Image (cartoon, grey):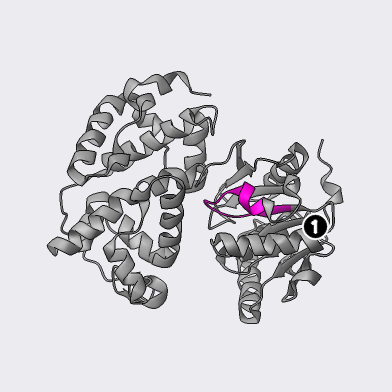
């Protein structure tokens, strides 16, 4: 049994989008005496405090704060601090939310290991990287867990909880218990318990598998002079953003960091193509720089939603995800496909691939064989578990 009354100080390191939203839900839970938000950048900290206050005020205005809670009572518990050691020296639970660069994370966990209290559990919000490699730097890997949130965190229900090779069951159970108490506007938190790590865990492992297709499409469109939006329109309808526009929205630098990590850990075929590489070299990072794959005005891409390329469709997307889900089952990352489908629904607000895949796996296997031949990407070839349909026996 986990005693949450002992967890009084909750610290978040990193005041970017993820960090400030994690701090916000920690405050909204009203579980902690203090929520400390740390960052080396004072502007980011002040901006984060304003964002958190506005977010809580909005929830209060809708009557959705807990009984007896007010924005004022909650925001009093928030402390912002530029000094890392001050921020962690009395913390009971620490969540890291800094950029997805392994060396940066390892450097931070080295400091957490040296200066955080001996009993503190250290969580990384990495979306793709090895918990074990991050944990190793801390000198206390048994107290390190993966705790991957999905933005907007106050809204979406999913947290992926991941064990590293040396994570203790006690630290893991504490992460689960805290995660379950963090409120989400869309309903009860869904904690996906991942007993064995893999690059990208569940949600990102499936979604990043599809980047192979979009990376190839981007280079092919550049080479043939086909407007990129035609391919986005193959997958979505207005006003939803297509996959390439979503890359721009997230930041092409972030996308390339993740692709490079997958190229190293899973297959060299994940490496960013010529178009992405050239855009990065030119400093065209997408929405945040005003230009990327598309030009952006007032936070929106300049896109015509009318014409389609007519070469791809959503079935390709789900076929790739079904194949990757079957790989996760084969690697024993999860015990059954229901966990994958439930996790995708909670984190992405979209169905996982197995609901439709149970009926379509033979057709989709053929589609992937054809896609592999058309693109020259061998990673698209369906794995045996998908082709044979043996995954059907692995529901739970």
Residue 229, by quadrant, is bottom left
Q: Position of residue 177 (x, y in %)?
A: 73, 42
Q: Position of residue 145 (x, y in %)?
A: 68, 47
Q: In the rendered structure, which segment of residues is drawn in magenta?
A: 122-135
Q: Position of residue 141 (x, y in %)?
A: 72, 48
Question: What residue is pinned by disc 1?
Answer: 32
Q: Is residue 253 left or right of residue 96?
A: left
- Identify which residue is drawn at 71% across, 49% down: 144
Q: In the rendered structure, does residue 126 fall within the stretch colored magenta?
A: yes
Q: Is residue 136 left or right of residue 323?
A: right
How would you rate the neighbour count of disc 1 (Cα within 10 Å): few for under 14, some for 14-19, many for 20 or more?
some
Q: Nearer the viewer, residue 331 or 93?
A: 331
Q: Is residue 305 visible?
A: no
The residue most toward the bottom is 43
- Identify which residue is drawn at 29% across, 35% down: 381
Q: How many marks?
A: 1
Q: Nearer the viewer, residue 1 or 208?
A: 208
Q: Position of residue 387 (x, y in %)?
A: 32, 25
Q: Is residue 176 above or below residue 44?
A: above
- Identify which residue is drawn at 66% across, 57% down: 25
Q: Is residue 344 visible?
A: yes
Quadrant the N terminus occupies: top right
Q: Is residue 297 above or below residue 388?
A: below
Residue 194, by quadrant, is top right
Q: Is residue 252 above or below residue 187?
A: below
Q: Nearer the viewer, residue 36 or 329?
A: 329
Q: In the rendered structure, does residue 341 fall within the stretch colored magenta?
A: no
Q: Nearer the viewer, residue 157 or 36?
A: 36
Regarding mark 1 in the picture, which secondary structure is present there?
Answer: loop
The residue most toward the left is 224
């Amino acid at each position: 049994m986990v005693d949450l009354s002992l967890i009084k100080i909750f610290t978040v390191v990193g005041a970017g989008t993820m960090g400030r939203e994690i701090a916000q839900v920690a405050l909204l839970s009203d579980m902690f005496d203090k929520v400390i938000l740390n960052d080396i950048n004072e502007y980011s900290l002040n901006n984060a405090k304003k964002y958190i206050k506005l977010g809580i005020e909005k929830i209060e205005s809708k009557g959705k704060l807990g009984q007896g809670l007010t924005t004022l009572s909650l925001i009093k518990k928030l402390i912002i601090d530029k000094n890392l050691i001050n921020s962690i020296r009395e913390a009971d639970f620490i969540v890291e939310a800094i950029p997805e660069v392994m060396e940066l994370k390892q450097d931070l966990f080295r400091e957490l290991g040296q200066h955080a209290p001996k009993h503190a559990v250290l969580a990384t919000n990495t979306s793709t990287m090895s918990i074990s490699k991050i944990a190793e730097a801390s000198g206390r890997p048994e107290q390190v867990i993966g705790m991957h949130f999905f933005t907007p965190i106050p809204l979406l229900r999913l947290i992926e909880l991941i064990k590293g090779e040396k994570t203790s069951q006690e630290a893991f159970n504490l992460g689960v218990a805290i995660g379950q108490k963090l409120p989400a506007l869309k309903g009860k938190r869904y904690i996906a318990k991942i007993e064995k790590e893999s690059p990208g865990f569940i949600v990102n492992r499936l979604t990043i598998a599809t980047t192979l297709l979009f990376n190839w499409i981007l280079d092919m469109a550049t080479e043939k002079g086909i407007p990129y939006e035609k391919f986005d329109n193959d997958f979505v309808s207005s006003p939803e953003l297509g996959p390439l526009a979503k890359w721009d929205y997230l930041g092409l630098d972030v996308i390339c960091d993740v692709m490079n990590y997958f190229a190293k850990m899973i297959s060299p075929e994940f490496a960013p193509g010529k178009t992405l590489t050239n855009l990065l070299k030119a400093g065209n990072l997408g929405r945040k720089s005003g230009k990327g794959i598309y030009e952006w005005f007032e936070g929106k891409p300049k896109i015509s939603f009318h014409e389609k390329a007519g070469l791809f469709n959503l079935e390709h997307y789900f076929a790739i995800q079904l194949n990757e889900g079957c790989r996760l089952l084969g690697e024993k990352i999860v015990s059954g496909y229901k966990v994958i489908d439930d996790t995708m629904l909670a984190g992405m607000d979209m169905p996982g691939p197995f609901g439709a895949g149970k009926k379509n796996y033979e057709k989709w296997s053929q589609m992937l064989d054809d896609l592999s031949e058309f693109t020259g990407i061998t990673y698209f070839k369906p794995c045996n578990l998908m082709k044979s349909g043996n995954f059907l026996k692995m529901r739970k």
